[in-house]
Amino acid sequence: MLIKKNKIGWVIVVVLSLLPVWLWYLAPTSIPRFLDAQNTLANLGQLAGLIGASMFALNLVLAARFSFLEKYFNGLNRMYDWHRWFGQIAFMLLLIHPLLLLPKYTFGSAVFAARFLLPLNSTAQNFGWWSLFLMTILIILTLYLRPKYNIWKLTHKFFGLAFLLGGIHVFLIPNDTYIDLPLRVYMLSLVAIGLAAFAYRSLFSAWLVKKYDYTVAAVRELNNQIIEVTIMPRGAVMKYEPGQFIFVSFKNKFLDSEIHPFSITSASDNHNITINIKKLGDYTSYLDKLQVGDIAEIEGPFGIFDYKRGIYQKQIWLAGGIGITPFLSMARSLSADDGYKIDLYYCVQNESELVYLSELQKMSPYLTVIPYISSQQGYITADTIQELSGSLDQTSIYVCAPLGMIDSLTKQLRLKGVSSHFIHSEEFNLD
Ligand SMILES: Cc1cc2nc3c(=O)[nH]c(=O)nc-3n(C[C@H](O)[C@H](O)[C@H](O)COP(=O)(O)OP(=O)(O)OC[C@H]3O[C@@H](n4cnc5c(N)ncnc54)[C@H](O)[C@@H]3O)c2cc1C
């Protein structure tokens, strides 16, 4: 089975993480690797360490948000999904790494075992210990305690330190990586790549990550929940495709300078960029304090949620709440002679949320808007979509909505025989 280009990213990560096993296998050894149970376990432990360290290094690359990698992972959201999976797998491997080494190096002695599992050994071993200790704390914090986003983000930066300590351990410890040149060069390259990716995103991003300078040109409150902000370039213009998003940081005394992701809602031929933001939390609730002339620093564009990537021109767009935003850019970028035939389901809880309805309705006949109000009609289902839009054959479907709605509709559509290749989704969550 051929793997599509947009899904090949995870395969590459797995292959590159497993490559040290092959190099290890080729490396000369004086004692047969699987001589007895102790040697077997110790060798498996070494392999767990090598695979875990390689995956950790590549995971730092995924976390560095390189936009050129998005197309191999089906978008940034999916790339971050893989990042979460690989992070957990790497951690498990690194955790079992010392445990598998125990029988060989502790000779069945509880005292030796306790010593081995504490930072009371050689410098090389201690680097590994501190790396694993730090990683354990960070994993518990990230996955189980789930602090507020800004604290979560700050603690994530310490993964770089855990990796650095682990990387030093890999090179100091007297095992195959120490002796065998190909394995050493390979691991050194991966560690260097991982550290460079980490430094790019977390240490020197202010200088290395390309940003565009914009300035706020207009701020409009659409209803008491949604703010529309238009920004215009102060220098270089960022080009984008409909449906893409940016990370933006505003300079305003009421707002912290943290970057937040927002979908672009303006047409892609527009030099100015418009974003529409729902007031939801600590940051977004203060965006109405923005003033014309405030500076906006943007990074992007990101995302591959673009109707032009769909195979079919007959399309169904499913927007849940503020999930309408990428569709606004798509709709505004379309024209009658593009040949598309689109049904846009504009799903909201209450009628007052249909703020873009009249604008979108003017795009008929190539775009038909179907407002759907859940407080009156219940949740939209695939049956309803089929009833109103007809056959779902040869139709590309786009969903941008809360995760629950995406999951439920995707399942229902799949049960109706729609292939996952024709369902494209975007969720407003990256953590
Ligand atoms: C690809 C993408 C596109 C988006 N497009 C839009 C849009 O067009 N309009 C819109 O209103 N919202 C959009 N969002 C959601 C928006 O980014 C969050 O609602 C906003 O960052 C929440 O900030 P807050 O501090 O006000 O909310 P909080 O209540 O503090 O946070 C709510 C959640 O938002 C996420 N979040 C918070 N801060 C950040 C951050 N700095 N970076 C990333 N995620 C964060 C976390 O998951 C957090 O749990 C989009 C999100 C993504 C990932």
Image: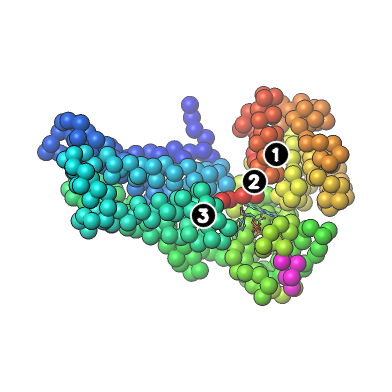
Instruction: Please state if 425 lies on the left or on the right of 98 as rendered.
Output: right
Say whether residue 38 is visible: yes
Q: Residue at x 66, y 70 (%)?
A: 255
Q: Are marks 1 and 3 in contact (CB under 8 Å)?
A: no
Instruction: Please state if 387 lies on the left or on the right of 144 as rendered.
Output: right
Magenta residues, dominant SS class: helix
Residue where numbered disc 1 is placed: 405
Question: Is the residue 221 above or below the residue 242 in the image?
Answer: below
Question: Residue 238: x percent and y percent?
Answer: 63, 61
Amino acid at circle 1: Met
Q: Nearer the viewer, mark 1 or mark 3?
A: 1
- Mark 2 near ligand 1 (CB under 8 Å)? yes
Residue where numbered disc 3 is placed: 65
Neighbours of disc 3 within 10 Å: few (<14), some (14-19), many (20+): some
Q: Residue at x 36, y 42 (%)?
A: 93
Say whether residue 201 is visible: no
Q: Is residue 114 magenta?
A: no
Q: Are marks 1 and 2 in contact (CB under 8 Å)?
A: no
**Magenta region:** 286-291
Which numbered marker is on residue 348?
none
Residue where numbered disc 2 is placed: 427
Q: Nearer the viewer, mark 2 or mark 3?
A: 2
